[in-house]
Image (cartoon, grey):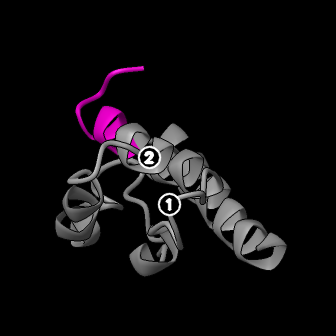
Amino acid sequence: MVDRRVAIDSNLRALKKRRDYGRKATCMIDPQSLLPRDKHDLDSIALIVEAGYPAVAPILDQLLEWTADGRWLVPSLISLSLWGHR
C-alpha cells in the first residue's frame, strides 16, 4: 500500500507542478492504480480527488459501478467526489 501511494503521490506532485506553470501535463498516472481495492480502501478516495479530471476519465465507468452500493463509505465518498461535493 505504501509503495502504491508513494508512486502515485510523486506523479500527482509532478502533474500539479506542471499545471501550476500553465503547461500541458505530460506526467502519466495509471488510472487503474487509483481504483479502490476494496470497500474499505479510503486512501484511494484522496488519490482520486487529488488526481481529478481528466486523470480519472479512463476509469469513470468503474467509479460509477462503485457508487451503486451506497451502504459503504468508499462508494459514498466516490459519489460525492464525482459530483464535486466536499
Report whether 73 appears left or right of 61.
Answer: right
Question: Please, which residue is most extreme toward the top here?
Answer: 86
User: What kind of residue is marked 1?
Assistant: Lys
Name the residue rendered at 69%, 60% in the picture. Answer: 9
Quarter occupied by the C terminus = top left
**Residue 18 appears anywhere in the view:** no
Residue at disc 1, secondary structure: loop
Left or right position of 13 against 81:
right
| Span highlighted in magenta in the image | 78-86
**Residue 39 numbered mark, or none:** 1
The residue under the point 78% across, 68% down is 6
**Crowdedness near tag 1: few (<14), some (14–19) or many (≥20) residues, C-alpha within 10 Å:** few
Q: Closest to the observer: 84 or 73?
A: 73
Three-letter amino acid code at disc 2?
Trp
Residue at position x 42%, y 38% in the image: 77
Estimate the x, y position of residue 33 in percent, counting from the top left: 51, 77
The correct choice, above or below, for 19 with respect to 14 in the image is above
Q: Is residue 79 covered in magenta?
A: yes
Q: Specify few, some or many for label 2: CA neighbours under 10 Å numbering under 14, 14-19, or 20 or more.
A: few
How far across and how far down the image is residue 49, in percent?
A: 46, 43
- Residue 24 is covered by the magenta coloring: no
Q: Residue 12, percent across and down?
A: 59, 57
> How many badges with numbers are in the image?
2
Badge number at residue 72: 2
Image quadrant in which the N terminus is located: bottom right
Q: Nearer the viewer, residue 76 or 7?
A: 76
Cβ atoms under marks 1 and 2 closer than 8 Å: yes
Question: In whole angstroms, how far apart are the C-alphas of marks 1 and 2?
Answer: 6 Å
Q: Position of residue 25 (x, y in %)?
A: 43, 61
Residue at screen point 20% across, 57% down: 64
